[in-house]
Image (cartoon, coloured by chain):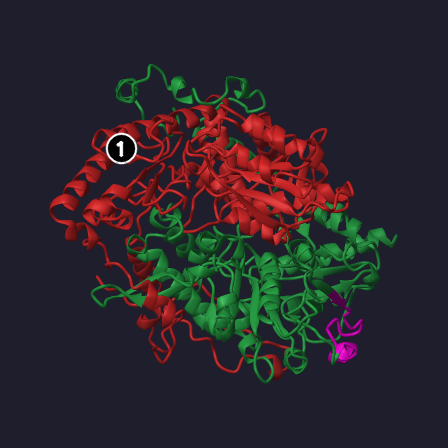
Amino acid sequence: MMMSLIHEQSKPGRRATSQAPLSKADLQGIPDRFLRRAPAALPEVSEMQVVRHYTRLSQKNFSIDTQFYPLGSCTMKYNPRGANELAMLPGILARHPEAPDSHSQGFMACLYELQEMLIELTGMRAVSLSPAAGAQGEFAGVAMIRAYHEARGDTERSEILVPDAAHGTNPASAIMCGYQVREIPTGSDGDVDVEALKQVLGPQTAGIMLTNPSTLGVFDRRIGEIAGLVHQAGGLLYYDGANLNAILGKVRPGDMGFDVIHINLHKTFSTPHGGGGPGSGPVGVSERLAPFLPVPMVARDGDAYHWLTEAERPQSIGRLSAFAGNAGVLLRAFVYARMLGREGMPRVAEYSTLNANYLLKRLQQIGFDAAYPERRATHEFIITLRRQAKELGVNTMDFAKRLLDYGFHAPTTYFPLLVPECLLIEPTETEDKATLDGFVAAMQAIQEEAETDPERVTGAPHTLPVKRLDDVRAARELDLAWGPGGE
Amino acid sequence: MPFIPHTEQEIREMLDTIGVNAIEDLFDEIPPGLRCGELERVPPALSEMEVGQLMGRRAREDGQPVCFIGAGAYDHHIPAAVWQLTTRGEFYSAYTPYQAEASQGTLQLVYEYQSMMTALTAMDVSNASLYDGASALAEAVLMAVRFNRKSKSRRVLIPRSVHPAYRRVVHNIVRNQGIELVELAYDPVGGHIDPALLEPYSGQDITALVIPQPNFFGVLEEVDALTDWAHANKALAIGVVNPLALSVLTPPGEWGEQGADICCGEGQPLGAPLSSGGPYFGFMCCRRALVRQMPGRIIGRTLDLDGKTGYSLTLQAREQHIRRSKATSNICTNQGLMVTAATIHMALLGSEGLARVAAACHANTAGLVARLSCIEGVEPLFDRPVFHERVFCLPVAANSLLRSLAAHNVLGGFDLARDYPELGSAILVCATEKRSDEEMNAFADKLERVIGMQAGAPCQLQPKDW
């Protein structure tokens, strides 16, 4: 079904809503030269048109609430409705960010307790909740590494090391902090190539950014040795928390030797991904980085909570957003953490790992190739369709698109870059066995189609609102906004 | 097990398939010495009902004071439909639309959002959002420096009339990239950037000028003259604007002869609840020529294989997941759900509705200004036109006065002492469309009494009347 834009449903002069004040007040005291000459071309539609339009649009989305969504390294697990409702209690929504401490004790208690839980879960010394997303957490982490070295007068360190399997945000964040990036290769077993690491460590090394388990879906077994080597060279270790779901309550980044970590609350703590955010990327640090944490943070003094800001924390890298980060996301994570409790935390790692290993084994049994068949899967794993691409002319993107026809969101495709024709699959702990079996059946059916009727797969999807889109045209003939004249 | 659906029998079958005895065996590649013990500082689980009771208690503990603080976050009415639609699972629990065919809902919605933002700002292009207004300004500064390659100085002028937290965030984000931020003084009488104050910089190599509208004090800047000055000096003009205000004020695309080059700001007034400062969203729009330096996601309209209209992420070669260390920004996840709310909010209100809200806020603040100005010693500061926010000088210390008001459940304004000590005891006050005449009268009343008490004047009414 083709759907018109909301703009195209507009009729000049339609006023059918009751959301705005019933009359227009005078803009007294504002001279004409400051005033808008013509009204903005926003749609003029009724409330019912709006409700119907956006309800219908929503139905064109795949989502966790409607489909299995095994997008690797994104941890698309069920987002509890209770967490949403409790973060949207009227009193919570009404709190102004500049409300005084006297009217903030309840809110600050939640944040303080979340800080404490994250400290315990990561094995770090202190946590700041303020970064607005994982990438901002990475920025904060690298900025703290820089501030630490500079505070010691150690100003010659110019490089951040990043494995070739890392998320693209890692190198991009390091560059934003003024560092050069050097890539470290991965060994054939999926672990960081320690010999190659030794070659590049030196007095110019500011730190290394690692994800463990890595985006290859394996736990780096030599992490202790890597931490020793990096520390020996005077560098610090940054932990990208994208894959924390795999080890929650089992192994703590602090115990592995990491100095700084960010946590994606929208992954491990099940806050919604929202069609692309908001996320939340709290950072945790070891003792020596604690003075540099971003503000604001919450402190407790007896029974009273108060903010720590630039004034109390002069060495802080400062604030990264105008207020206290994505507060409402923090509250959702807090509610989720309280519902899981102490005993629920390791279960996250256990059942996400069980699901991943089961799914991997089933896919192997029907003939798919694991990228690292000798390794245990963590909470996610990679299969490579190199063989299918070569022998059948059906590649990873074709499988991904055909999965949509079978009612499954595609796994992450073509990432990490070093495994050709790869699917990175993360089932999460909230999926049941029947769903995983259904996914296996779909993969098997697609494999058979690839062998007998490859056009069926290469031409997929067939059942969605649109077929494959012309991305080249999208980039060449940019059409980024509707114009009143029509474009 | 909360949120984990496995039965004992299924667990057994799954372990048998894998070929291990216990779930614990799946962790056998992790060196045993690294394993952690019990998580003592994580409390035991609560049921949904029990957490609900806890959260209800804490929400009540914070009261619901009558709020006259603005300072970058504004207490507006949000239509019921906005969050009822936004929290539909299909919006709420989807992710970045990497698989376009399975994400046409979010993609078309963001295209509509981009269309609404370009209409509101009169700019050519909008991205799909950044974290908040402050980080959007930091990204705008970085973008201006990347684009304006003819300027070698990497010097950016930021007036002190820009939100102080925004200035700090910009500093914190760009500090390691060799960019010089030069703070411009504001005119002490008008509270604005007098274009004459820019004269010392004329003819110099300036990369960009930041222009707030309205500025942090609520004061309206001479945006046309400032934009023209920037362009005459080969600098880019970056607007920092309140999107609600743009329903009535000249949009950045029409500032001066050529319009601003980039504009950004805090999207919160478009459907985001106050919620302690987040999640909100930063917006960013620019001239077409700058689009390839834009950070963040951008959605384009295109055709599918059958020639049917569809939407997809475009210009991805700017982004970190493709370009890695050469990306325009490290941003990945943005504030998609808040953009969903904003799009529905703007569709419901339309330009007439937004303009009515803006005018109602302005009129309410004007009414409050009139009431407060009658109080002895309370003086509105700055003699220039304002939009919906105003600075007042007080005859007593602002912090203790605000504390006293808060004790009576009124948040009387934002204390300017920390960021603008030169103003003495001063507060920034805003009355949105939600504040009633009764609330404003009560505020004026309480303010007068508190000042009377703190200034040592006799109090004529008994505290019980409060």
Query: Could you tell me which quadrant the N terminus of chain A lies in?
Result: bottom left
Q: Looking at the rendering, which quadrant does residue B245 occupy? A: bottom right
**Range of the magenta residues?**
B182-201
> Does the magenta run of residues contain B185?
yes
Residue toward you, A276 or A13: A276
Residue pushed farthest top? Answer: B21
Q: Residues within 10 Å of mark 1 (few under 14, many from 20)?
A: some
Q: Which chain is red?
A: A
Q: Position of residue A50 (x, y in %)?
A: 34, 62
Residue pushed farthest left? Answer: A452
- Residue at the image position 53 percent from the left and 46 percent from the top: A170
Q: Which color has been applied to chain B in this rendered view?
A: green
> Does the magenta run of residues contain A43?
no
Residue toward you, B347 or A262: A262
Q: Position of residue A52 (x, y in %)?
A: 30, 59
Residue toward you, A325 or A257: A257
Q: Is residue A197 visible?
A: yes
Label 1: which residue?
A436
- Residue at the image position 56 percent from the left and 34 percent from the top: B57
Q: Position of residue A210 (x, y in %)?
A: 53, 37
Residue toward you, B374 or A202: A202
Q: Looking at the rendering, which quadrant does residue A412 occupy? A: top left
| In this view, B16 is above or below A22 | above
Residue B215 located left or right of residue A22? right
